[in-house]
Image: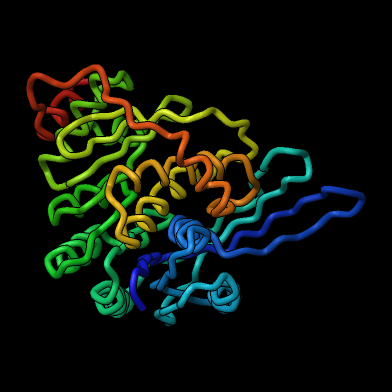
Amino acid sequence: MSGHVMVFAPTPRLTVTVDQPADHPELHLHPGGQGVWQARMIMSLGVEVVLCASLGGEIGQVLEPLLVSEGVDLKAVVRDSGGSGGYVHDRRGGTRQEIVDVPGHPLSRHELDELYNLALGEGLRAPVSVLSGPNDPTLVPADLYRRVAADLGANGSRVVVDLAGEHLTAVLASGVFFLKVSHEELIVDGRAEGDDEEQLTRAMYDLHSTGAENVVVSRAEEPALALVDGEVFEVEMPRLQATDPRGAGDSMTAGVAAVTASGGDVRTAIRTGAAAGALNVTRHGPGTGRLDSITGLVERVRLVPAGTRPQERTTPDELAERAAER
């Protein structure tokens, strides 16, 4: 299998949605979670996916056939110590109302070892590996991400991540090819003092200097910022009417991974990721989109040089000190 992507999704979730588009209520069951949504979009872009995950308990038994039906090549660690998580949402009123959210159980040391070996073996066969975050940071320790990123990167796989907090810090120590992060996450983590372009640009250069070769920072309604080849760009694209804002960032990450695995350059990958993310919010269901629609929108996405560049580098320690002072 050439040109495929390994998606590391340690804690996929069962999503149950109650909807009523007509006279009678409907119940929809799907696999979900960041890695699953990323895998779905990568396949929408015509690239095959190997999904490495852990499954446990009754929810895990339900998730397995649902994941296989998505079309991924599923490689799973079947858990003995705990169950997978999930949530129930009610969308009958037009907006999502959360009924219950079950995070699942932390993975045991044995399960973590099995998952590491699985991800390493499959990732070494793939030109690109996407490391998706756990649905709760307490379920999978950050050090597992550091090990996977280090060993894959050292052996030629391009590592793509969408992480925050200690999991982001861990993979930066190993180095990654591409990092996507939101401006809110940068502020919460103390890597940026505010949401203005200068602060975010400083944070992007800091992320680059500490281990991320290329960086994209999403900014909600504002154009994303991209750091490529040492230069910062604004990702400009047409505005579309949003139906469901969830999953835009995951679709962007997926687009970058898909194009990179297919041999495309980083700038085309970012433009494709931006188009995939923009179209995702016009649909119900994270990680969904039509290839022809995404391809058509890519031509309208531009990387425009940003107007500011920091005159001095701010180290992560300095940012942490400023956050502590606040």
Q: Position of residue 277 (x, y in %)?
A: 48, 43
Is residue 273 depicted above or below 48 in this figure? above
Residue 44 appears left or right of 175: right
**214 or 45: nearer the eye?**
45
Query: Does residue 148 show up?
Result: yes
Q: Position of residue 148 (x, y in %)?
A: 22, 66
Q: Residue at x 31, y 39 (%)?
A: 216
Q: Residue at x 54, y 28 (%)?
A: 239
Q: Residue at x 75, y 38 (%)?
A: 94
Residue 222 appears left or right of 96: left
Report the quarter where the C terminus lies.
top left
Q: Position of residue 255 (x, y in %)?
A: 41, 51
Q: Residue at x 27, y 76 (%)?
A: 125
Q: Position of residue 292 (x, y in %)?
A: 56, 51
Q: Quadrant of residue 209?
A: top left
**164 or 237: nearer the eye?**
237
Is residue 228 depicted above or below 60 in this figure? above
Is residue 212 depicted above or below 140 in this figure? above
Report the quarter where the N terminus lies.
bottom left
Residue 274 appears left or right of 307: right
Query: Does residue 288 show up?
Result: no
Instruction: Name the image colouring.
Output: rainbow
Residue 283 appears left or right of 77: right
